[in-house]
Amino acid sequence: MMAEPTQSIQTTEIEREVREFVVKHFLSGRADKLRDDGSLMGDVIDSMGVLELVTFLQDRFKITVEDEEVVPANLENINRLAVFVAKKLDAKV
Amino acid sequence: MAALMRISDVVKHWAEHSPDSPALVESSGAWTYHQLASAISDTQSWLRGLGVRPGDRVVIVGENCRSFIAILLAAAALDAWPVLVNARLSNREIDEIQNHCRARRVLYTISVSTHAADHAKRHGAVVEEREGLGAVGIGPLNDEAVPECLDSNVVDRVAALIYTSGTTGLPKGVMLSHRNLLFMAEGSAKVRSVRPQDRVYGVLPMSHAVGLSVVLLGSLVAGASLYLTPRFDPMTARVTLEKDQITLLLGTPAIFNQLLRYATLRKISSLKFPALRIISSSGAPLDSATKSGIESLFGMVLHNGYGITECSPTIALTRPEAPRTDTSIGAVFPGVEIKLIGSDGQPATASEVGELRVRGPNIMKGYYRAPEETAAAVDADGWFNTRDLARLEDGNLFIVGRTKDLIVHRGFNVYPAEVECVLNAHPAVVQSAVVGRQVQGDEEVVAFVQLLPESQLTSDELAEYAALHLAQYKRPSQIVLVAAMPVTPTGKIMKGELREMAASVTLPH
């Protein structure tokens, strides 16, 4: 039961950092352009943007993201992305 | 194989002789040749039930997926005219096409395209879950649509109507016949020795000429399997090339540049796919850095080709048996004639640059409802004027420039007049001029804009406005606000000077 809050805090922190990166790099600093659901699909980032985002995640969180893992289930929105990164970090421990 | 009369016939032979071979494969499922033939047949009945008659225009808005293909081939089998529309076009562009062609029905294949779903919603289409086709948006019946007369010769009937943005900013509908497309499909498959064992990566949009004739029909006519993807992404591409043992990858310089960037970011120096036998680029000029970079990464030759929608589209391509080390577009497509005309109107002599003219079974029937534009493009002897400048060396063509202002961004044609038209419509804009800027493997759209003196409009705000009215690939990479345009004494904007300015200013990061 104790692990849950830790996971939640960690995910929230990851979410904050990812949000900051996306807004800065893909939305010209305009946080209001990000949809409420934090969706990254459609016009927010293109395929090369996804690649840059993955590179950022690898460098920032010291994780390895395989090409096979770059699927909507993991990257559809910022929340899913944060959960995915958190799982990767947990797996490292 | 029996003579093919319609593009939908490409499936028949394989449906009979190898019914269980995979024809179309996508992440959500696959169709064998038998299933594809059944889907086309079922869709024909469905279209009839929707009031579609021979000679009617049926607009299909979507991205690469099985339902897009089933509807397109079913419409063609019915002698209706499929009007192929990339769902990524803006509202304005799609509305212009729909109005110009006076469509009987507009259908939206929305299973893989949120863009198509948005357009369907906007047009009040009824979304129906069709067995096999997935979710399809059905626009209302246009009672006022009048069917076009059919050519007595089946192969000369219109098999597809593809709109390209005209130099005047208005879209032109290129009428491609069954003969045009079958000639291109069979010739492309032959040149590349495509066989039933081949697995082709289907990333180029089927709503555009090369995706339709070379990739889609060129694969099906040879009995190969086509792996559909609605949009390119290097990571998915890498996985698919490896796992599905793709044998042919046809892309654009922009796609190959994305692969190079992917390799750099992923710190990969070698991407080897043992099954892959041909990689080829078309849709925009291939620069030597992209060609050599990809050849080094893949350890194989990157072929090159050149074409224009009006020519179905291929005019020349390098041959697998005669790879080039330079960026020549290769030899003329088999069965196609060319000539180069100098600025004096006379045929160019050997190695001299001339305007490229093309004649053959690949030349379009004409522009829909635009006889004057057709006459300006194709002369009485059947020669189509590409308005591109080329030279011929030992049977290989080199494109050296363009006689028109067309910008090719990410493999898509961008006509400055169309972008200028949108920018000029903004109340704060006095005038605008759009030019291309060469960057590695691509050409960017750069807009110079003069605002009303009192205007506080920023370039970002104007970019947001442009985004509402232009497909993503047509949106300027940079909007430069200028106090005044450089003009000639007669008031004509000096685009040459703007091109130089565009090359010297860089994007802020």
Image (cartoon, rainbow, N blue to C red):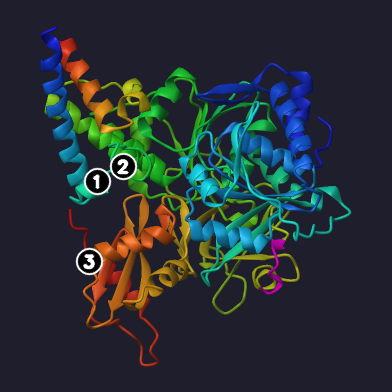
Q: x%, y% of residue B168?
A: 53, 72
| Label 2: few (<14), some (14–19) or many (≥20) C-alpha neighbours in 10 Å | some
Which image quadrant for residue B462? Answer: bottom left
Give the side of residue B14 with respect to residue B264, left or right.
right
- Between circles 1 and 3, the one closer to the viewer is 1
Indicate the chain on which mark 3 is placed. Answer: B
Are discs 2 and 3 both within one chain?
no
Q: x%, y% of residue A11?
A: 16, 24
Looking at the rendered structure, the secondary structure element under dot 3 is: helix
Image: B302 above or below A1: below
Is there any visible trace of residue B394 in the rendered image?
no
Residue A45: mark in rendering: 2
Which residue is more in the foreground, B391 or B506?
Answer: B506
Which image quadrant for residue B41? Answer: top right
Give the side of residue B414 with respect to residue B38, left or right.
left
Residue B504: mark in rendering: 3
- Residue B368 lies in the magenta stretch: yes
Indicate the chain on which mark 1 is placed. Answer: A
Give, as a three-letter code, the residue at label 1: Phe
Q: Please give the name of the residue rendered at 74% of the width and 28% of the height, measured from the top-left corner.
A: B37
- Residue A41 lies in the magenta stretch: no
Residue A26: mark in rendering: 1
Which residue is more in the foreground, B454 or B475?
Answer: B454
Q: Please give the name of the residue rendered at 43% of the width and 61% of the height, measured from the top-left corner.
A: B469
Which image quadrant for residue B443? Answer: bottom left
Q: x%, y% of residue B164?
A: 56, 59
